[in-house]
Amino acid sequence: MWVIVDHSGDEVEDIALELLGQARELADRLGLSAVAVLLGDDVGGMAPLLGQGGADTVYLAESPLLGAYNPDAYTPLLADLIRRERPSIVLWGATDQGSDLAPRVAARLGTGLASNCTRVDLSEDDLLVMTRPVYGGRASCNVVCPQARPQMATLQPGAVPAKRLDPSRQAQVIAVDVSLSPQSLRLRLEEVIKIPPSALDVTEAEVIVAGGRGVGSEEGFHLVEQVAHLMGAAVGASRPVVDAGWAPYERQVGLSGKTVAPRLYVACGISGVNHHVVGMRDSRAVVAIDQDPQAPIFQIADLKIVGDLHQVLPSLVERLRQLRQERVTAEDEEVLRTLANVPGARQDS
Amino acid sequence: MKVVVCVARVVDTSEPLPVRSGKAALEEESLRHILNPADEHALEEGLRLKDRFPDSGVTAISVGPPQSESVLRRCLALGADQSLLLWDEAFRGSDTLATARILAAAIRRMGADVVLCGKRASDGDTGQVGAQLAELLDLPAVTSVLQLELRDGEALVHRRLERGRREVVRCPLPALFAVEEGINYPRYPRLRVLLRSLGAEIPRRGLADLGLRAEEVGEEGSCAQVVDVSPPKPITKGLFIPDSSLSPEERWEQLMSGGMEERHGDVIQGPPDSVAERLLEFLMENKFV
């Protein structure tokens, strides 16, 4: 029972812990051990956390060549490891890396893969049943892989809840030999470009601040943009705002615009007609600001603010600005404190 | 330069689908079919390469039953030079890897400098065939491509990552690229070319032509099997107990929706400053700022 760990280079991604929780549960039911496979450059520090998350064993492959994700390095390494150790099930995150890597490894091994699963479970004869959406989410299908091994699935982030960490658990760490030559890497990573959140496409943003008819004017919409900027969020708009020319069409959320599912959606002056709501109802958290307490947007809001956005938003902008300044000074303090503790930098009697 | 674009005929998922519980598959042939949207963008990217390098040829290939001729005709109408249908009754029921095997066999015979495909099919939505095809052909490959630039036998590619990041990758040719829908705006067909495409002969290759064995493809050659298809269910976050103060009709509605519809958030009212303060608290509590 394996989990291929997604990480950012310094930190284990949430999806890896979600998968480990799921793997632990399935492993216990099948009487298998749960194994986390960790690839990267100098990532051994994450192994204890994986143990607490449910892994019995951590396979650790470290090499400077594994620093950034490169399919030419990861694919042969994992395919060889799986061929040698013969896990019966391998779970991956349906992330940038997992979605690219899992099909490649499946092709090398000649086994089946179900991608973007929302659920995995065991059938009566202990086969992995992988549930995934098809036809644009209008249906879901169950997939099994009866003959070939391993059975492999990529799971969507957030599909299974992460289990609580158990600090008493420890995993055995096994180092894996990495025999890769730099010449075998055909792809070369030049750079990673980070797009400022305010310019980011609404479908990719984690936080969206959107304005609707209630902003009243172009100046009103600027308030929304200010809040978005200070929160590091993308700007969204409902159709009336786009029709009025206050926001460009690519910012429009809703039936005739884009469908989004961010972690947080802040709706400012959006009444919440159905045409808009279908475009954002899958957001994990919704904050709504509107003058009309009966506005339908409040039915789907986690935080309902009844008030005039022209007064609330400037006040929020002020607070966010203060917060930023405080944070900057706090960070400075932190650096100063660390420096003060560096041996030799300052002598306390 | 030889450009091969892999395209697929898919169910138009923007139309209502008669999905019934427990069936192994939809009665797909009764539904409307279209050229897979992502593949149309892949074709457009191929045509743009041809615009830039005029000595290029663009071939559209597809694995699918004879009805798939319609999407190949569409590719010809949009400007592809040639098309090829890969079909044999033995191909029926192929999973992604078996499909990739069929495509790989065809591309090996044709040769290609650039292989293009869509990131995912809008109906099956696996997003696997591109990466698997590259492995079988042993080509370097980049998936989720948002920008493609060819220069001196090399490609400079922008790959889409999560959280709005882009990766710039340098990749030698020949290579495979699986493109995202945002990469370009597909062109419209020209009337003259469109009319010509309607009468075009579309060559077909089967099992023996491609040198494949029956056990490598179709249901026999597929590892992953779809057991059943059902309407999607909401993921409930715990046992749902309907609110007894509601009318039976509303309770029934709540049950049917999985109890996920309405969110009972806190209502906040008052002077703007205190409201903003509470909002900021909420944002900080949940680590949004």
Image (spheres, coloured by chain):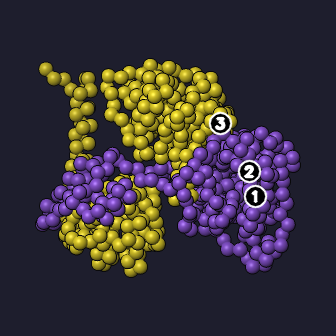
Chain colours: A yellow, B purple
User: Is the residue A217 above or below the residue B252 in the image?
Assistant: below
Q: Position of residue B12 (x, y in %)?
A: 61, 65
Badge 2: chain ID: B
Would residue A211 be seen by someone viewing this image from the given angle?
A: yes
- Label 2 is placed on what type of residue? Arg
Residue B34's quadrant in the figure? bottom right
What separation in Å lies between label 1 and label 2 (alpha carbons)?
8 Å
Q: Nearer the viewer, residue A330 or A167?
A: A167
Amino acid type at mark 1: Pro
Can the viewer see residue A189? no
Q: Position of residue A322 (x, y in %)?
A: 20, 55
* Quarter residue A55 falls in: top left
Q: Eyeballing the image, is A217 above or below A296?
A: below
Q: Earlier in the sequence, mark 1 or mark 2?
A: 1
From the image, tell me which residue sits under label 2: B92
Residues at marks 2 and 3, common chain?
A: no
- On the image, numbered disc 1 is attached to which residue? B65
**Quick one: SS at disc 1?**
loop
Q: Nearer the viewer, mark 2 or mark 3?
A: 2
Marks counted in the figure total 3
Report whether B202 appears left or right of A130. right
